[in-house]
Image (cartoon, grey):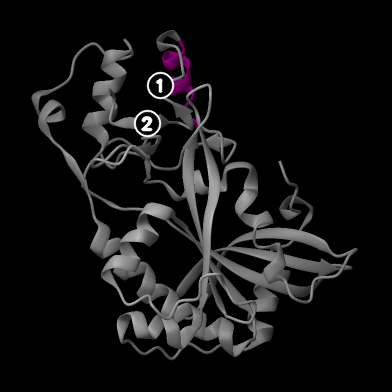
Amino acid sequence: MSKVLELFGQSTSSVAPANWHEIVSAQKCPFLGKRCYKVRKSDPTISIGTCSVSYGREAEPVIICPTRLIERRQIFTDCLHLLTTHEPGNELHVVSEISIPGGSVDFFLVSARNGKIRDFVGIELQTLDTTGTVWPARQLYLQSVGVLKQLSVEEDTRAYGMNWKMTAKTILVQMHHKVQTFEHLHKKLALIIQDRLISYMQREFQFDHVSNPPLAGDSVHIHAYGLERNKVNTYALKLRSRLSTDADGIGRCLGLQAEARIELEQIIDALQAKISDNTVFVPI
């Protein structure tokens, strides 16, 4: 059985071997609707395309590409309730990569009326980082379906692992810095994460104070998703659990301090410049 479970958004257990030539040649990410942006450093013309892999004794896939989380744009629909001042008739927009103190936020779900920002929620995506590279496993699978004829010894023997601790600590530190800004503005910040990663964080960090079920007034909302196999051996993203806390709560996990402050007008100006007909949210 292949360790690569999804390649270019396609399940390796459901696609006929003869179809992989076309899929690999196209290098298309179905979640973005364009070429996969993760390319080889040694050859940028080659997209890697690996979405999820198997790891450990658990049968459920491990998502290693954040873009895998935007399947059907469900994560944005699941954040609609965090727009506390959204009103019927307002337009919804999805805007990517807005910079704030402490870095940039992956997405903003924006409520606007007559082209003016009325409300927004920040949305951060986090999947597991690997130690080593999944490339050899990818190549081995493509050889098994006839796309490749031969592998190098290096590609045959190198293995990958999961960087659980560093991934978890990095995202908690980033969230702590960024939520200071959102809390100052009385806005919400959502973390979209896989259920296997949040389970690890609950075991290894102090999470007893994190609310489950979530509290509407909290500034940090954590949505944990899993990949469920369906009858045709493909995977679908499913919301498994929701948690919440605030800036102090994230700080209790890490014992860190952050001093992120920004005026509301600065974020609104950055969002205002990016919303257009092309960013209007259309559920798929």
Question: Does residue 127 appear in the picture of this structure?
Answer: no
Q: Name the residue under label 1.
A: 13
Which of 170 and 193 lies nearest the eye of the viewer? Answer: 193
Q: Which mark, by number, is residue 5?
A: 2
Earlier sequence position, callout 2 versus callout 1: 2
| Marks 2 and 1 close (CB-CB < 8 Å) | yes
Q: How crowded is mark 2: few (under 14 residues within 10 Å), some or many (20 or more)?
A: many
**Mark pair 2, 1: CA separation:** 7 Å
Magenta region includes residue 20: yes
Query: Looking at the picture, does residue 145 appear above or below residue 215?
Result: above
Give the residue type that dot 2 points to: Leu
Q: Specify whether residue 8 is in view.
A: yes
Name the quadrant of the C terminus. Answer: top right
What residue is at 62 percent from the left and 89 percent from the top?
Answer: 263
**Disc 2 element:** strand
| Residue 17 at x, y percent in the picture | 40, 11
Image quadrant in which you'd find residue 115? bottom right
